[in-house]
Amino acid sequence: MTTTSGKIVDIGHAAFACHDIEASLDFYEKLGLTESFRLNHDDGSLMLVYLHVAGDRFIELFPNGPDPANRPPQGSYRHLCLMTDDLSATVVSLRTQGVTIDVEPKQGLDLNMQAWIRDPDGNQIELMQIDPRSPQRAVAEGREPAPLEHLAVPAKR
């Protein structure tokens, strides 16, 4: 039996809003990071693209980001994802330490459990517990991610 601690165990992903998703995909491909899968909105439009870094670590690229000419100095940063082995315990622990939980634990489109907090500077932090059926877990284990009711689309590249 696996025991959990309710502590942060790894970085899950960094997320960026991209003005030109294809240019961003080309750039990251030059770094050796290729598209793993996509998540789409209910209307079929692109929500985000996952790039696999290593293990179960990813970069998320969101379309329709700000034009680089008008972008704020911090760039297109959206959020940092920290992984936990027990999201419920993590949320309880943080709450008892006075951390405000902005979004209570819920299941995401990728089947993973997530909750959201902010650091003292207002930066969003996603807390995530990986589901064994998630596309992230499949990619980390070297498997093709299974479609998630037409929301997750395997890489086209």
Image (tube, grey):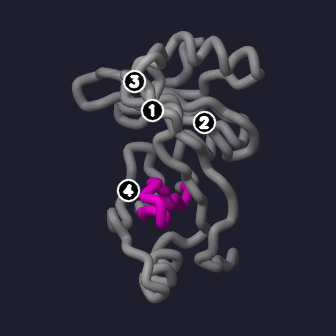
Find residue 107 and name its label: 4
Q: Secondary structure at mark 1?
A: loop
Who's the residue at 58% across and 43% down the image?
A: 14
Looking at the picture, which amino acid does disc 4 mark?
Gln
Of labels 1 and 2, earlier in sequence is 2
| Residue 29 at x, y percent in the picture | 69, 17
Q: Residues within 10 Å of mark 1 (few under 14, many from 20)?
A: few
| Of the two numbered discs 3 and 4 in the rendering, the one whose residue sits closer to the viewer | 3
Whether the residues at callouts 2 and 3 have beta carbons within 8 Å, the answer is no
Q: Which residue is under mark 2? A: 59
Q: Is residue 22 left or right of residue 85?
A: left
Q: Which residue is under mark 3? A: 66
Q: Which residue is under mark 1? A: 72
Whether the residues at callouts 1 and 3 have beta carbons within 8 Å, the answer is yes
| Of the two numbered discs 1 and 3 in the rendering, the one whose residue sits closer to the viewer | 1
Q: Residues within 10 Å of mark 2 (few under 14, many from 20)?
A: many
Q: Residues within 10 Å of mark 4 (few under 14, many from 20)?
A: few
Find residue 62 and name its label: none
**Residue 72 drawn above or below residue 132:** above
Who's the residue at 68% across and 65% down the image?
A: 9
Q: Secondary structure at mark 4?
A: strand
